[in-house]
Amino acid sequence: MPDNRYLQPGWFTRNVFNRTVRRLTRWGVSVAGSRELRVRGRTSGEWRSTPVNLLSISDQRYLVAPRGTTQWVRNIRVNPAAELRVGRRSESFRAEELPDTEKVPVLREYVRRWGWEVGAFFEGIDKNSSDADLARIAGGFPVFRVLPG
């Protein structure tokens, strides 16, 4: 699957779902592990924010872009210093992008945990898909390890 894959959100997602989740997260309510991701714009340098699901596996934390190469992905690739917020709690971090060869267990757990929300973006992949199927699609799903800032 190509690295430039991008599924644009529809009107409902942009104007209702994302805004609702962002607002709740800003008020300190994490919806199923949601956080507000804040990254610097790659050309403007201004802070940009979007709701994301923070995935924890053992002692590692990850951000997965189920829609592919989104604006936040492009921005964080240029400036890996970012913030995660819930309410007033803010955590600075540094993002490290995983190579496709390391994504399979992260993608499997992400789909297992949030398949109800993002399953449509994975086009036939679910928590029971083979490692080969997950490896085949890995290039279309940017994954970042969240490291101390």
Image (tube, helix red, strand yellow):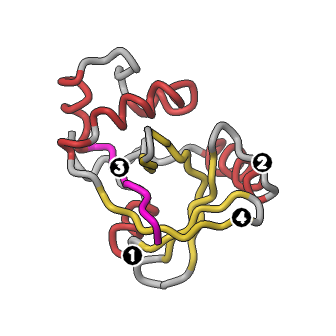
Query: Which residue is rendered at x = 44% and y = 45% of the image?
Result: 59
Mark 2 / mark 1, whichever is N-terminal: 2
What is the C-alpha distance between the residues marked 2 and 1? Answer: 27 Å
Pick whichever, 1 or 8, lies toward us. 1
Eye-nearest disc, 3 or 4: 4
Mark 4 / mark 1, whichever is N-terminal: 1
| Disc on res. 38 | none
Residue carrying label 3? 143
Eye-nearest disc, 2 or 4: 4
Q: Does the stretch in magenta take in 118?
A: no
Magenta region, residue range? 140-149
Residue carrying label 1? 79
Percent x, y for residue 43? Answer: 41, 83
What is the C-alpha distance between the residues marked 4 and 1? Answer: 21 Å
Residue carrying label 2? 29
Query: Which residue is rendered at x = 33% and y = 68% of the image?
Result: 77
Vertical placement of residue 50 versus 94, above or below: above
Vertical placement of residue 100 versus 128, above or below: below
Mark 3 / mark 1, whichever is N-terminal: 1
Residue carrying label 4? 89
Query: Image quarter for residue 57?
Result: top left
Assess disc 2: are there few (<14), some (14-19) or many (≥20) residues with their C-alpha within 10 Å of its C-alpha.
some
Query: Which residue is rendered at x = 39% and y = 60% of the image?
Result: 73
What is the C-alpha distance between the residues marked 3 and 4? Answer: 23 Å
* Amino acid residing under circle 3: Val
What is the C-alpha distance between the residues marked 3 and 1? Answer: 15 Å
* Amino acid residing under circle 2: Val
* Amino acid residing under circle 1: Asn
